[in-house]
Image: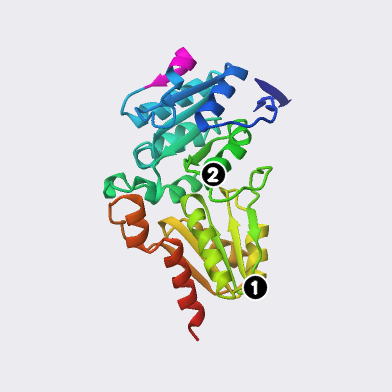
Amino acid sequence: MYADNSPGTRTLVIPPLPASHFGSYEAGLTELLARDDRFVVMTAENRAAIRGLPALAGPRFIDVGICEQTLVGAAAGLALRGRFPIVHALATFLTMRAFEFIRTDVGIAGLPVKLVGGFPGFLSEANGPTHQAIEDVALMRGIPGMKVWCPADQEDLLLGLETVMSDPGPWYLRYHAAPAVTTHHAPFEIGRAEVFAEGTDVTLLTYGLLFGECFQAAEILRSAGLSVGLVNLRTLKPVDLESILAAARRSALLVTVEDHLQTGGLFSILAEALLAAGLTVPVLPLALDERWFKPALLPDVLAFEGFTAESIAHRIQRRLSQP
């Protein structure tokens, strides 16, 4: 559906969806499919989160096989024909193998294609470097017009599902649907962070999988008598500059925590924000600095790489103790 704004221009219009509560990501997609026959679910043989959809979606479920470039190209074609494709693939192959297709076919055209990257960051756990998507945020946020969403857990994901899927532009979703460690704040707003607490000693800035560890790390630090802030960024593009800069002005130390390379991720976003605002504040980046992570089961990955709640709290306390 298009609206004419001026001669020679057309703007995509997606009717707003009424609020609802989904029990799961798959249930949410099922409801979207039922409401609007323009939604199409696609995959490159990555059905972990959508195993029940083929029987429900019928011809509006398309599996192209293990060929992510074809997946993105086909999604762009369907979007040009008025469909709203929601595509699923392993994050590492979606964002890297199909990068040119995303940039050229989806990004330049500004098409309403939603890219769902499965098993990003540490969620790839037992897989080696070839399957570790730890530069995906950097790649996707570098595409003009592309928005980036990194929900903290299933509850956070469901709070933003309708808003993101109904948005008329392209999105990259760093898929994460584990049980929540706490109740999240509603409503979800694009470009608005979820500020859990404000602190004067330290503020943790994080997103996605590691929010849960940061939530517990903040509790550990508070028990040690520190004033601790915690911010779940939610969308990294657009990012909530207001909340980031407020934390920078309030806290003696900012800590970025992410299962991503230090280059191009949240640490880079923070550096860009501070430089643009003319602010200087001590920053402790907890990320993967020029290295891949050691494959193992997720609890062992977090322990080995130093991203458990206890490790995060210890690394912050050590930094605060330095003169």
Q: Position of residue 25 (x, y in %)?
A: 52, 32
Q: Is residue 42 above or below residue 320?
A: above
Residue at the limit of the structure toward the bottom, as seen here: 323
Q: Amino acid at mark 1?
A: Thr
For this view, does 55 lie left or right of residue 244? left
Q: Position of residue 147 (x, y in %)?
A: 55, 42
Q: Amino acid at mark 2?
A: Trp
Secondary structure at numbered mark 1: loop
Q: Position of residue 52 (x, y in %)?
A: 44, 22
Q: Nearer the viewer, residue 300 or 31?
A: 300
Task: Considering the whole magenta stretch, tell me its main secondary structure.
Answer: helix
Q: Residues within 10 Å of mark 1 (few under 14, many from 20)?
A: some
**Marks 1/2: CA–CA distance:** 28 Å
Name the disc covering residue 149, or none.
2
- Tell me the magenta residue range: 55-63
Q: Residue at x 58, y 53 (%)?
A: 233
- The reply to whether the C-beta atoms of the residues labelled 1 and 2 are less than 8 Å apart is no
Is residue 268 one of those drawn in magenta?
no
Q: Is residue 306 above or below residue 101?
A: below
